Image (spheres, rainbow, N blue to C red):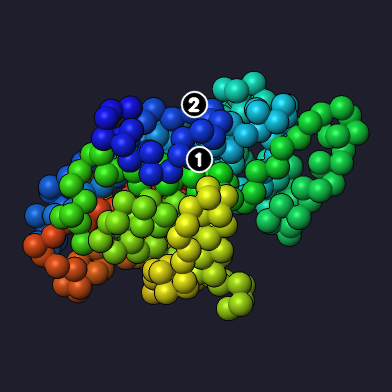
Amino acid sequence: MNCKANFIMQKCSTLQHLPKAKLGYLPTPVIKLENLTRILGGPDILMKRDDLTGLALGGNKTRKLEYILGDAIKKGCDTVITAGAQQSNHCRQTAAAAAKLGLDCHLLLGGEKPGNFNGNLLLDELFDAHIHFTKENRKGEDIPNLVGTLKASGHSPYVIPYGGSNELGACGFIEAGFELSTQIGVDNLSHIFFASSSGGTHAGLMIAKSLLRHKYELTGIQIDKAENEANSFQQQVLALANSTCSFLNLAQSYRVDDVVLDKGYLETGYGVLTEQEKEAIQLLAKSEGILLDPVYTGRAFAAMVDKIQKRELPNDKQVLFWHTGGAPSLFAYSRTIL
Ligand SMILES: *Cc1c(COP(=O)(O)O)cnc(C)c1O
């Protein structure tokens, strides 16, 4: 790590001393989307390439898993368990990380076993994960049972929450925010856009932003519909940001207005591909040769493009799209993507 990065890391000494498993090839590049900037005629568009974190086709979960699995290994666990959708990028990266670290991996995936394994699911199988199809239990409801069974057979399991979004996962994105500030002059940025779902990316970037006193607007694009207002995604990000600050002995805390989460692009809910995602995926592929995914980055990128086209962003500053990965699931959507 270079000198500037070291200086920044000292802003958060607890973070520096957490155990970490090395999984990513970091820093990821920051690039300019010159062709797309020209086509849209708005602000300069930058992209942080966390689709290139390097672990098994990349993605944002790699950064979270470095801290989460660092903890699992320190605690002497031999098995990891996590849950998600069948095309979960989090589950695929967890399976790959477990393979690399010599841990057993159990994945609980919602729905019925499909006839054909494709996209992330195919990769889960290649990484030799134990896959359980949990039907209507889509958010890990069956985990306690599995923990009991594994313990009874002499294993030491470690449960990773949905999307890897706990305090340790958020630490990966505090570090990511620090990393960005060693790469570009953030004073020129008006906005950072990214896809926000289980909230770890959002909480981590928020904390990095306030520790470094950055001024850009950090705008999460909400990907899933909330089940109820009391437990809205904004509340979940807020709770995680505050618990991560306590965990790291940081003095700051946040109010709900500090969490900027745009609900304007949800359409029909999680994982439902509509024209806006298709157009965004095709636009970036054709103009820059870069792949987005149908569930997360396709939606969030469509949101940013929409705001540029409506002239909602200042032309004399730059905007940055934080690419969080996910392209392997394109193959599972091959029939609907074009
Ligand atoms: C998980 C995921 C996200 C959302 O990140 P959270 O930290 O869960 O909010 C965004 N993009 C991709 C591709 C993902 O896999």
**Along the line of sight, the residue nearer the viewer: 71 or 102:** 71
Residue at point 60% right, 23% down?
A: 101
Residue at point 38% right, 38% down?
A: 10
Name above or below for residue 68 compared with residue 306: above
- For label 2, the crowd category at 10 Å Cα-Cα, with few meaning under 14, some 14 to 19 and many 20 or more, is some
Q: The disc labelled 2 sits on which kind of residue?
A: Lys
Which corner quadrant of the image does residue 1 belong to? top left
* Residue designated by label 2: 22
Kindly state the secondary structure of the residue where label 2 is placed.
loop
- Image quarter hosting the C terminus: bottom left
Asked if residue 278 can be seen in this view, the reply is no
Q: From the viewer's perspective, is the residue at label 1 or at label 2 nearer?
A: 1
Give the image location of residue 265, x and y in percent: 39, 70
Residue at point 19% right, 68% down?
A: 313
- For this view, does 333 lie left or right of residue 42? right
Q: Earlier in the sequence, mark 1 or mark 2?
A: 1
Residue at point 72% right, 26% down?
A: 76
- For this view, does 299 lie left or right of residue 317? right
**Along the line of sight, the residue nearer the viewer: 281 or 143:** 143
Give the image location of residue 205, x and y in percent: 40, 53
Give the image location of residue 181, x and y in percent: 27, 44
The label on residue 201 is: none
- For label 1, the crowd category at 10 Å Cα-Cα, with few meaning under 14, some 14 to 19 and many 20 or more, is few
Looking at the image, how many numbered discs can be counted on the residues?
A: 2
**Along the line of sight, the residue nearer the viewer: 295 or 174:** 174
Kindly state the secondary structure of the residue where label 1 is placed.
helix
* Residue designated by label 1: 14
